[in-house]
Amino acid sequence: MNDAPDIKKGLVGVLADVSSISKVMPETNSLTYRGYAVQDLCELASFDETAFLLWNGELPTKAELAAFQAEEKANRALTPALLRVIAEFPKDAHPMDAIRSAVSFMGMEDAESEDISDAAQRRKAMRLLAKIPTAVAAAHRASKGQAPIAPDPSLSFCENFFHMVFGKVPQPEVIRAFDVSMILYAEHTFNASTFTARTICSTMADMHGAITGAIAALKGPLHGGANEAVMHMLKEIPSPEAAAGWLEGKFDHKALVMGFGHRVYKTGDSRVPTMKKYAEIMAEVVGDKRWMNTSNVLAKIMLERKNIHPNLDFPAGPAYYLMGFDIPLFTPIFVCSRITGWAAHVLEQAADNRLIRPLSVYTGVEQRPVVPLPQRG
Ligand SMILES: CC(=O)SCCNC(=O)CCNC(=O)[C@H](O)C(C)(C)COP(=O)(O)OP(=O)(O)OC[C@H]1O[C@@H](n2cnc3c(N)ncnc32)[C@H](O)[C@@H]1OP(=O)(O)O
Ligand SMILES: O=C([O-])CC(=O)C(=O)O
């Protein structure tokens, strides 16, 4: 009989709780939010409607959407104090550290910070959804020595983000591709950052604390940071023709190829075909097919040689690059979307809470006496 403890390293395959927010079905490479296929939401709904859906369980009526959008627009501005803090961030601060710190500061400023009732948490979620893009854009501009651009309430959520980053709104095809990426990034069950948010919330800590922790978890290149790593990787490859040789070098060193593999999907990420379609539209709009051609070579060889499929970060990286964003903005953009899923999970965790606290198997030295300092030499 084997008495070895059954450790699920990385919590692989562990069912940690129930959730009614989204469902990943790896057997069919599909994903639903509140029962709606994510591809259908991309086709027939907007990111605002998706945010409402994740928080309320149903798609909004026209009146509900108008009220939701009005509230989001009314909450976009940052306080002068936060704008001053952002202006003082070190110029070379990591953008994910900047948004993590800005969200933490927002918590200290929020009059309802300590109120963890469902109603207050929902109001704070809305404030975070509205303010995070403003802080991301302001921190990015500050890192380049540029003044922030105030949010424009006459613009949609996505248009306003471009306005705050670039000072102008691009053509509708670009806004559409960005909106689709925001829908696709919004929610994905118990991923590492969402589970972090739920763990923090399970101690009855507040919404801003949970989201600050989630941002810290998303930063890593094994999770959200991969969309930036993908673009750095694509830029390292001199041409699509050079991609095969470049990949051989990675295989020789047993290196990770960023934007490939997934803990749950083993035969393809449900979101990749939709994001790839919009990355290709962006390549058409910009008139630059190089990144998608190189991507196609990498994806083909990864599948043939390693049987590993791309994940959402793989097409999202070049899509954002083609939209004109600097690479350090890619993972903060992911934050602007995933705040919706994180907040939905914080609300769900709090509604039926039990402290999250797993066990570990101790492998250190056995108990021993403390030798007082004078006798330790
Ligand atoms: C939005 C998101 O967060 S999506 C994920 C974004 N992250 C990335 O793109 C980073 C690159 N990918 C990875 O590091 C991994 O695939 C993860 C972290 C996403 C998933 O990790 P796990 O579920 O633990 O997969 P696991 O490590 O068991 O992979 C199985 C095998 O495939 C290999 N593998 C998995 N992904 C990759 C990859 N990207 N490049 C090369 N090999 C890989 C592993 O080395 C392992 O090989 P082995 O059996 O010889 O040891
Ligand atoms: O589900 C995961 O582990 C990672 C992921 O794709 C996401 O968070 O979108």
Image (spheres, rainbow, N blue to C red):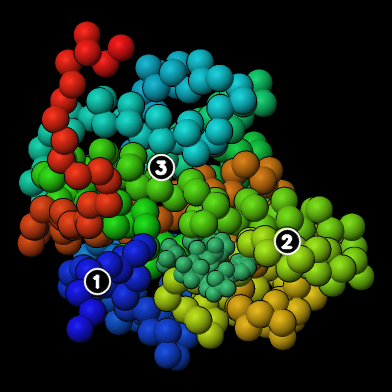
> Which label sits on residue 149?
none
Question: Which kind of residue does numbered mark 1 sit on?
Answer: Ala
Q: Label 2 vs label 3: CA separation?
A: 29 Å
> Which label sits on residue 4?
1
Q: Tag 1: Cα neighbours inside 10 Å, few (<14), some, or many (≥20)? A: few
Residue occupying the point 30% across, 12% down: 377
Q: Label 1 vs label 2: CA separation?
A: 33 Å
Q: Tag 2: Cα neighbours inside 10 Å, few (<14), some, or many (≥20)? A: few
Which residue lies under the disc numbered 3?
216
The label nearer to you, 2 versus 3, is 2
Front residue (pair 250, 15)? 250
Residue occupying the point 50% across, 81% down: 266
Which residue lies under the disc numbered 2?
253
The label nearer to you, 1 versus 2, is 1
Q: Quadrant of ligand 2?
A: bottom left
Residue 217 in view (yes/no): yes
Q: Secondary structure at mark 3?
A: helix
The label nearer to you, 3 versus 1, is 1
Residue occupying the point 63% across, 62% down: 256
Question: Which kind of residue does numbered mark 2 sit on?
Answer: His
The location of residue 58, given as percent across then percent down, is 24, 73
Residue occupying the point 72% across, 82% down: 305
